[in-house]
Structure formats: C-alpha cells, structure tokens
Image: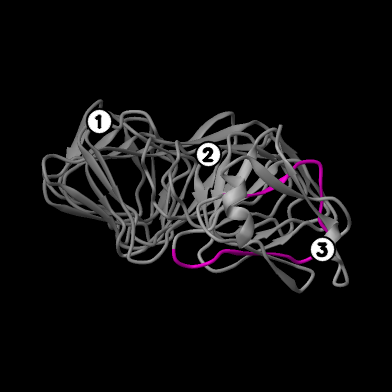
Amino acid sequence: GDNVHLNRAFNLTMNSAVAACANFDMTGYGGTISGIQPLNFSGNLTLGGTITWTGQCIAVGSGTQVVTCNGKTLAGLFRVACTGAGIVQFADTFRTASNLQLQSGTLDLTNNPTIHCLAFNLNAGTKTLKLGASQWFLTFTGAGTVWSTSANVTGFTLTTGPGVPKLTFAGGALAASVLWGATQSPLCDVEFTGGAGGFSWSSNNGSFHNFRASGAGNVTLGNGAWVDFDFTGFTGSWTESLGMTIRGNIKLVPTMTLVSTTSISLRGTGGQTLTTAGLSIPFEINVFNPVGPTNVLTLLDQFTSTRLIRLRDDGAGIVAMGGQARTLSSLSAMTASGWVFAVVDRIASSVSATEWELYQKQ
C-alpha cells in the first residue's frame, strides 16, 4: 500500500472494510480519527491528534515496523501479524485501551519499553515474544484471562533479558487469571496492585523472579518457582493451592490472611528469611538444601504453624531462629527414613533445644 500522512486539522472516519497502507503517520495531525473498521499497515505507525477509532490496528509487514505513540492511546485491539521474519518494535510507551495480541512475526521489546493494555494473548501462527526488560501494566476490568501464553503455543518462542521484565496487574470487580504454558520460565517480576475480583496464576511449573502484592483483593498462586515474596501493603488473602518453590525471602503482613492445603518448598542457595507478622502458617514448609551451598532459613519473628517444617534429605541443613543458628545436618539421614522436625513452642532468642521436637512420621 501507499504511505499515509495526516498533518492537518480535519476529521477522518475509518469506514473502509479493508484499509491498508505502508506507513501511517499522524505527525502534526490536529483532527479526530474515528470509526470501527480495521487498518492493516506494513510500515511504521506514528500516532497523533485525537483517537476515538476503535477498529483493530494490525501490523502485517515483512521487515522491521516501528510504532510510536507520542503519548496517544489506541482505542482498539493491536495485533502483531507480520509476514515471515517481520518485526514490530515500540519506540516509546505503548498504550491501547484494548488488548495486545501476538499472531505471527516477532514482537521485539529488547529496547525495554513500557506497555499499557487490558490483556495480552496469542493467536495461531509462528511468533516470537522478546520481553527484554520491558515493563507491562495490564488493567483488566472484566472476568477472564488477562495474560495467556498457554493457548495457541504451537510455533511460539519466548525470551527475556538482558535485565528483568515486570508484569503489573490491576483488577476490577470480577475475577481474572494469568495462564502460562508448560516450561515457560520468563524470570519476570510480578506485582498485583489490587482488584476486588481477585487474581489467579497458573504457571505449569515455570520459573519466575519476584512476586509482590500491594493492594486489596485475593491472590491464588499455583505451582511455579519464585525468588522473593513480598506482601507489603496487601490486604487480601493468599491461597497457595498447588505447591510452589521459593528461593528468596518471604514477607507476610498482619492485614492479610493465608489459605492453603498443600506446602511450599524453600530452595535458597545461601540464606532465606521468613517474616510471619503474627500469622499462623497453614501450609507445610519444606527446607531443601542444595548440593554445595548451605541453605539457612532465618525466622525473623514469632513462628506459629498448624503444619510441619520439614528438613529434606538432599543436603546438610542449618536452621537459624531468633538469632541462634542450629545445625541439623545429623538429621539428613533420618529424613530419608521419614523423620521430621516441627516447632512445638514459641521461638525467641532465649529458646532451648527442647523447643524443637523430633519424631518419626507414621
């Protein structure tokens, strides 16, 4: 198609059933673009003027296409549907009041842009998402899936770095979910900033980075591996439903509640801390000690639990509580035969060894 350049103060209605062009440039545009029909563009997209147009904006080029929003927000869905080795890059902060969808080609975010959208998902096709260290803000207002890389995964490639990307989710009154495909491990930071409907996460044993919940609402996290868990500012409930691995520190707060029927595994490579904030822990804690470094679990405040802390048998163990380190390496052989240890009394700096009890699991 031809290049389109809008640079005057007139209004434009997108009413063609199939609108197509190479570059679509609104630099200097002083009017309003409206309508509901889609636009296929094979070159660059530069926004300007006033945008009430709700049609789909579809990148279909075979080369590198650059999208520049200039502080403007698209009203409709934006789809990456490039041909062959086509690439889409965002030159500045990308904003759409609708969804961002990847169908074919490469969405290259290695220049680390900020992205605002309602939701992200995949469509059928051969596609690559290079997250780089991009920063995402996904604001969902209805029920459904706000992030999905679990459907239409045939032909999908996912990469991250250099650096750590971050996904920030803010919700509404209805429940929303995040679905990752099997073996996808983007090592991204994740933050939930609130939503009365709640937030559920299914990761199919993927590996991620830090998790933070800082608003009101309920959070359900399934299996997966994380580094730090921080609930500073959180006023909802955390449901640990399928078992997960945490390699860093856990900070709970008194304004939250805990729900669980399973366990968490701690697999630090040097030291981990647990702050309970007076909450009773309803899940088992399995302390694993990796081959090589020794894992040290430090309990930073009073620990109360309705379940067990288990020292697993894949290495020597050290548990530090109340500032006093206790070496438990002699237990590693026993745990292989079903021995466990559990807290039976309040932990303080002056505790004696009798406040830890050994017994054989029946």
Q: Counting residues from the N terminus, which is met first, the one under dot 1 or under dot 2? A: 1
Q: Which mark is residue 207?
A: none
Mark 1 to mark 3 CA distance (whole Å): 55 Å
Cα distance between the residues tagged 2 and 3:
34 Å
175 lies above or below 157: above
| Pointer 1 residue | 154
Secondary structure under the numbered disc 1 in the rendered image: loop
Q: Which mark is residue 353?
A: 3
Which residues fall within the magenta stretch?
Answer: 292-312
Q: Is 53 part of what is drawn in magenta?
A: no
Q: Is residue 171 visible?
A: no
| Label 2 Cα neighbours within 10 Å, binned few <14 / some 14-19 / many ≥20 | some
Local packing at callout 3 (Cα closer than 10 Å; few below 14, some 14-19, many 20+) is few
Q: Is 298 a magenta residue?
A: yes
Disc 1 or disc 3, which is closer to the eye? 3
Location of residue 304 in the rendering, given as x and y in whole percent from the top left corner: 83, 51
Contact, mark 1 vs mark 2 (Cβ under 8 Å): no
Identify the residue under disc 2. 223
> Quarter of the image containing the N terminus?
top left
Kindly report the distance in space between the C-alpha atoms of the residues bearing marks 1 and 2: 22 Å
Q: Is 44 placed left or right of 272 in the picture?
A: left
Name which residue lies at 85% across and 58% down: 355
Pick the residue in front: 35 or 39: 39
Vertical placement of residue 201 versus 68, above or below:
above
Q: Nearer the viewer, mark 2 or mark 3?
A: 3
Q: Nearer the viewer, mark 1 or mark 2?
A: 2
